[in-house]
Image (tube, rainbow, N blue to C red):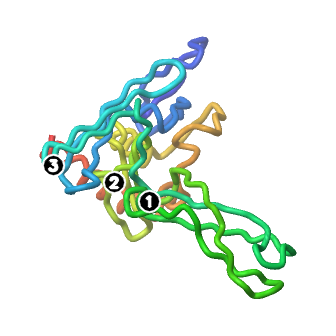
């Protein structure tokens, strides 16, 4: 919603037509209910989460295949990054480094990857560590499940966690004047550049409207 600060309100806001005020909310403000698809059977579902200082507690239950995920088990089924570094196993002269992305942590992630030494030309196996990849493909922040509210546009890929997230994006895009209290870690300050351009406004508005309609139908 378009907003403006009240004098002396310490950040409280009131709606003002045509204006948007960045109240400093981060993307995590919308992460308590995330529309997703099951990583096993693609059935639509929800990740439900709650924040208690200083961690999230989240769960997912698939109504299609009965897959279950709980944050207490620290599962991650989404994209991962594999990194490793060691001396050459043959000449010991050069450091060997490997870096790889995998689309899912459930598709046979290896414990080692081969790397060729630039000095002796021979290959050695490098042990890798596996880390969740939380940037890139649209995925829920708790388990890495693929998001359900995703819509391609001519400028870029639009995605959201839920209808409240979509409405916040629509309010931002609709505003002719955007104001901020200078919070550089807010969700709005981190939106991709193409979403902020006037020439993309109509396309983004239409994409958000379609996603809101589909979210209401799906429930």
Q: Are marks 2 and 3 in contact (CB under 8 Å)?
A: no
Residue 1's quadrant in the figure?
A: top left
Q: Are marks 1 and 2 in contact (CB under 8 Å)?
A: yes
Residue at mark 1 = 137
Which residue sits at x=55%, y=59%?
Answer: 81
User: How far across and how far down the image is residue 170, in percent?
Assistant: 37, 45
Residue at mark 3 = 65
SS at badge 1: loop
Label 2 neighbour load within 10 Å: few <14, some 14-19, many 20+? many
Q: Earlier in the sequence, mark 1 or mark 2?
A: 1
Q: Is 94 left or right of 217, judged from the image as shown?
A: right
Q: Are marks 1 and 3 in contact (CB under 8 Å)?
A: no
Q: Is 96 left or right of 213, judged from the image as shown?
A: right
Q: Earlier in the sequence, mark 1 or mark 3?
A: 3
Q: Real-space Cα distance between discs 1 and 3?
A: 24 Å
Residue at mark 2 = 146
Q: Is residue 39 above or below residue 87?
A: above
Q: Is residue 9 above or below residue 29?
A: above
Q: Real-space Cα distance between discs 1 and 2?
A: 8 Å
């Amino acid at each position: 919603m378009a907003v403006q600060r009240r004098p002396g309100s310490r950040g409280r806001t009131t709606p003002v037509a045509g204006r948007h005020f960045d109240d400093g909310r981060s993307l995590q403000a919308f992460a308590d209910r995330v529309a997703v698809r099951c990583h096993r059977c693609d059935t639509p579902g929800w990740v439900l989460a709650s924040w208690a200082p200083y961690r999230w507690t989240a769960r997912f239950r698939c109504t299609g295949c009965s897959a279950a995920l709980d944050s207490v088990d620290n599962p991650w089924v989404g994209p991962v990054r594999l990194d490793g570094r060691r001396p050459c196993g043959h000449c010991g002269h050069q450091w060997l480094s490997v870096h790889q992305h995998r689309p899912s942590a459930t598709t046979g992630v290896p414990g080692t990857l081969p790397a060729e030494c630039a000095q002796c030309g021979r290959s050695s196996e490098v042990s890798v560590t596996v880390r969740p990849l939380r940037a890139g493909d649209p995925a829920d922040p708790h388990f890495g499940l693929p998001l359900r509210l995703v819509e391609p546009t001519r400028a870029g890929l639009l995605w959201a966690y839920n209808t409240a997230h979509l409405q916040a994006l629509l309010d931002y895009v609709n505003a002719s004047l955007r104001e901020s209290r200078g919070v550089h870690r807010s969700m709005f300050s981190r939106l991709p550049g193409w979403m902020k351009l006037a020439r993309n406004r109509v396309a983004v508005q239409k994409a958000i409207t379609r996603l809101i309609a589909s979210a209401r139908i799906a429930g």
